[in-house]
Image (cartoon, rainbow, N blue to C red):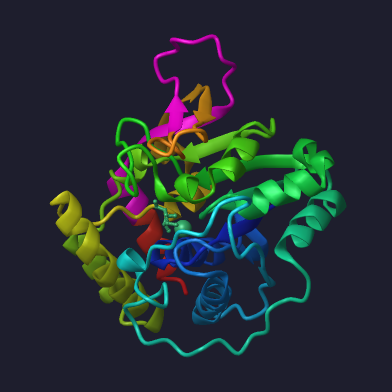
Amino acid sequence: MPPAKIIIDTDPGQDDAIAILLALASPDEIEVLGITAVAGNVPLALTAINARTVCELAGHPEIKVFAGADAPMTRPLRTAEHVHGDSGLNGPALPAPTMALQPGHAVDFIVDTLRTEPAGTVTLCPLGPLTNIALALDKAPDIAARIKEIVLMGGAYFEVGNITPAAEFNIYVDPEAAKAVFACGAPLTVMPLDVTHKALTTEPRVQAFRDFGTPVGDAVAAWTDFFQRFDKDKYASPGAPLHDPCVIAWLLKPELFSGRHINVEIETQSDLTRGMTVADWWGVTDRVANAMFIGDVDADGFFALLTERIARL
Ligand code: RIB
Ligand code: CA
């Protein structure tokens, strides 16, 4: 089977960075057509730098990286330096990237790629706020039918929110964008906090990266050490949830995950609950199912995959 062709839309973010490494470490199964940066964890100027930093760390300066939206569609940007640090990639000291940003806007790259590649062959992997994806759908509604699958990290139901009591960060930052993406009709797989909070970076799992004795392994361990300080304190947990790599792991080993194909709607009206993913897990409405909502993961299998692949870089 030929490798899956994907576009990673991202707001690095240490967990985004590890997701990008996992994709670049798996060329037999994944072809990264491009990476599109979006404002989220930190402003766009930094996410566009961070995406390139990660590509160079992985030894892939040939990857096309584009800058996208610097703010949500209608709301002011909310960032998360309190989790990820001022650079968004706090932890290791990594050199500034030398690879250039691609000319042109990320949204145009997404539209052009979906129109140029054969219909049904490109998977979108959003790891941050969904602004770029929604803008692409708005600019070119015809692309919705050409998307093979959207596999995104975002939302929460049984795990409830992490940026407000009701909402997960990626959906909260741009709920209007999320509403458009969840309604676009493309096959949608969602990795919410319900599953990512079961993929915890415990010390033995982080030590496995340190044991590589490579710059990549050291960077992954240092990133994890940095961002888990916040989550371990907040959740009183033995590690931090490794959110975004779940998206790439789904493409590599979907059997690691389980969930339900259900209706998921996005709340946009109330200040109290904006960005809530209203997941009809128990089928109590007649709303049409629009998302494979993932609830569980084989965490040991997930980290075994992550470790085995990233050790290749
Ligand atoms: O809520 C977790 C999500 O928000 C992750 O994608 C993390 O990188 C941040 O973007
Ligand atoms: Ca992210």
Q: Which residue is at a point 55% across and 66% down the rendered structure image?
A: 24
State whether residue 103 appears in this view: yes
Q: Position of residue 178 (x, y in %)?
A: 57, 41
Q: Position of residue 17 (x, y in %)?
A: 46, 67
Q: Position of residue 309 (x, y in %)?
A: 44, 63
Residue 251 or 92: which is nearer the viewer? 92
Indicate the quadrant where residue 167 lies.
top left
Q: Which residues are magenta?
A: 277-303
Q: Which residue is at a point 65% across and 31% down the rendered structure image?
A: 183
Q: Quadrant of ligand 1?
A: bottom left
Q: Which residue is at a point 39% across and 45% down the rendered structure image?
A: 168
State whether residue 239 appears in this view: no
Q: How many marks?
A: 0
Taking the image as shown, residue 16 lies to the left or right of residue 240, namely right
Q: Is residue 185 above or below residue 118?
A: above
Q: Is residue 83 magenta?
A: no
Residue 116 or 76: which is nearer the viewer? 76
Taking the image as shown, residue 151 lies to the left or right of residue 217, namely right
Furthest residue toward right: 116
Q: Is residue 94 above or below residue 179?
A: below
